[in-house]
């Protein structure tokens, strides 16, 4: 989506303040909070593939609103539609991929497959980021938005081609029954609960910071037209993290903690540098966090049993959304008083806390299954 690297600039050009931009991100996350778990249960009860092609159509409608009627109300409506898209796909994609691999006797390849899939997506993001500058210069936000809507249509068409061999549980159960069953699994199994908590702890903060990277780059003195090129470096780091996911799946508890700590230190150093060269450290940090994100998701999938896989994955995503809302609110407050680089550095602290918690935690044999 060509809009992705420049939509914060679109909002700023429309006269929105940092607080207003942050409020849009909060609305985006609130939509996910309300729909995340019900949509996961729906994916378990009906067709996961259905949700995967329906979501991009809604997202494309939201992007069209942004560029056709650029105003706070249109931006808000677009984020609601984008939030619905995210909720429909979250949980459904992971569950579909894991169970299709399991059907083929290749569940142990999940981290590698998902890592490579993320990498391909991130290469596409980098390509779009590189094109965003010249397209924006040639045709303005309308051209960038039109290309983004087209990308959503292509995404929906691709999703219709996904294989799906499972029989929907909805033939004998409602989505509410599926939801209760999935939550009961989490209550019974301590290792599932731990994996559910690890996902938001790893994913939320850097995922929220990603929305402010263009502002961080701009603060270093990079011209607006060159911001997309600087963001390519960050996405290159994220892509590298995705490609290493298969090997990192074998990281033990202390290795995983070290990965989080090293990434946090790189984020803090890159943020406070205040120079374009510091973006390379931010790219390194984001690569580490992406790597940890794929590994955390893999460990959750390995521990889930039964038919509520999409439901429990959505519960983890719900936790991520709730933490993300907190990060957006904190960023709105801190960003009004401190430079963006300082705020990025402060956001490294939760990862250091998580690294310590993971490193000192006693791991039961069931929790170590498939992770050592």
Image (cartoon, helix red, strand yellow):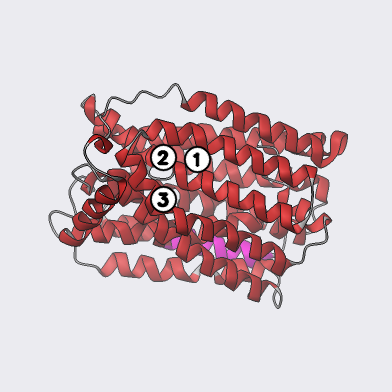
| Residue 108 pos. (x, y %) | 25, 34
Tell me, yes or no, if residue 28 can be seen here. Answer: yes
Q: What element does badge 1 sit on?
A: helix
Instruction: Tell us which disc is closer to us: 3 or 2.
Output: 3
How many numbered marks, from 0 up? 3
Q: Which of 324 and 34 lies nearest the eye of the viewer?
A: 34
Question: Can residue 266 be found in the magenta stretch?
Answer: yes
Instruction: Tell us which disc is closer to us: 1 or 3.
Output: 3
Question: Can residue 270 be found in the magenta stretch?
Answer: yes
In this figure, which residue is indicated by the disc labeled 1?
Answer: 240
Determine contact: label 1, label 3, CB under 8 Å. no
The dot on residue 142 is: none
Start and end of the magenta stretch?
261-273
Q: Which of 369 and 307 lies nearest the eye of the viewer?
A: 307
In this figure, which residue is indicated by the disc labeled 2?
Answer: 244
Rendering quarter of residue 59: top right
Residue 61 position (above or below residue 277): above
Residues at marks 3 and 2, CA–CA distance in whole angstroms: 12 Å
The dot on residue 293 is: 3
* Quarter of the figure that contains the N terminus: top right
What residue sits 76% from the left and 66% below the top?
17
Instruction: State whether the magenta stretch is mostly helix, strand or loop.
Output: helix
| Residue 186 pos. (x, y %) | 22, 57
Determine contact: label 2, label 1, CB under 8 Å. yes
Tell me, yes or no, if residue 295 can be seen here. Answer: no
What residue sits 55% from the left and 36% below the top?
56
**Label 2 crowding class (10 Å Cα cut-off): few <14, some 14-19, many 20+?**
many
């Amino acid at each position: 989506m060509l809009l992705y690297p420049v939509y914060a600039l679109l909002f700023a050009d429309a006269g929105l303040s940092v607080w207003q931009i942050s409020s849009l991100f909060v609305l985006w996350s609130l939509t996910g909070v309300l729909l995340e778990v019900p949509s996961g249960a729906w994916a378990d009860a009906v067709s996961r593939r259905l949700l995967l092609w329906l979501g991009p159509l809604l997202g494309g409608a939201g992007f069209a609103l942004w560029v056709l009627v650029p105003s706070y109300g249109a931006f808000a409506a677009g984020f609601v539609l984008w939030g619905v898209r995210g909720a429909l796909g979250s949980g459904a994609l992971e569950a579909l991929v894991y169970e299709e691999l399991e059907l083929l006797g290749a569940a142990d390849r999940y981290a590698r497959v998902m890592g490579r899939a993320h990498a391909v997506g991130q290469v596409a993001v980098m390509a779009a980021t590189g094109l965003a500058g010249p397209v924006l210069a040639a045709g303005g936000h309308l051209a960038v938005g039109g290309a983004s809507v087209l990308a959503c249509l292509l995404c929906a068409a691709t999703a219709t081609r996904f294989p799906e061999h499972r029989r929907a549980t909805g033939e004998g159960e409602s989505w509410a029954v599926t939801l209760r069953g999935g939550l009961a699994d989490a209550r019974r199994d301590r290792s599932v609960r731990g994996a559910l908590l690890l996902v938001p702890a790893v994913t939320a903060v850097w995922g929220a910071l990603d929305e402010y990277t263009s502002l961080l780059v701009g603060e270093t003195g990079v011209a607006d037209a060159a911001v997309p090129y600087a963001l390519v470096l960050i996405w290159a780091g994220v892509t590298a993290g995705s490609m290493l996911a298969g090997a990192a799946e074998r990281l033990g508890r202390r290795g995983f903690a070290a990965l989080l700590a090293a990434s946090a230190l790189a984020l803090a150093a890159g943020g406070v540098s205040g120079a374009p060269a510091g973006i390379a450290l931010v790219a390194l940090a984001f690569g580490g966090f992406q790597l940890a994100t794929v590994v955390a998701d893999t460990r959750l999938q390995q521990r889930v049993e039964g038919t509520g896989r999409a439901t429990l994955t959505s519960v983890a995503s719900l936790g991520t959304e709730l933490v993300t809302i907190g990060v957006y609110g904190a960023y709105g407050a801190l960003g009004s008083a401190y430079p963006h680089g300082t705020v990025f550095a402060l956001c490294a602290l939760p990862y250091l806390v998580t690294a310590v918690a993971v490193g000192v935690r006693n791991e039961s044999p069931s929790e170590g299954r498939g992770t050592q």
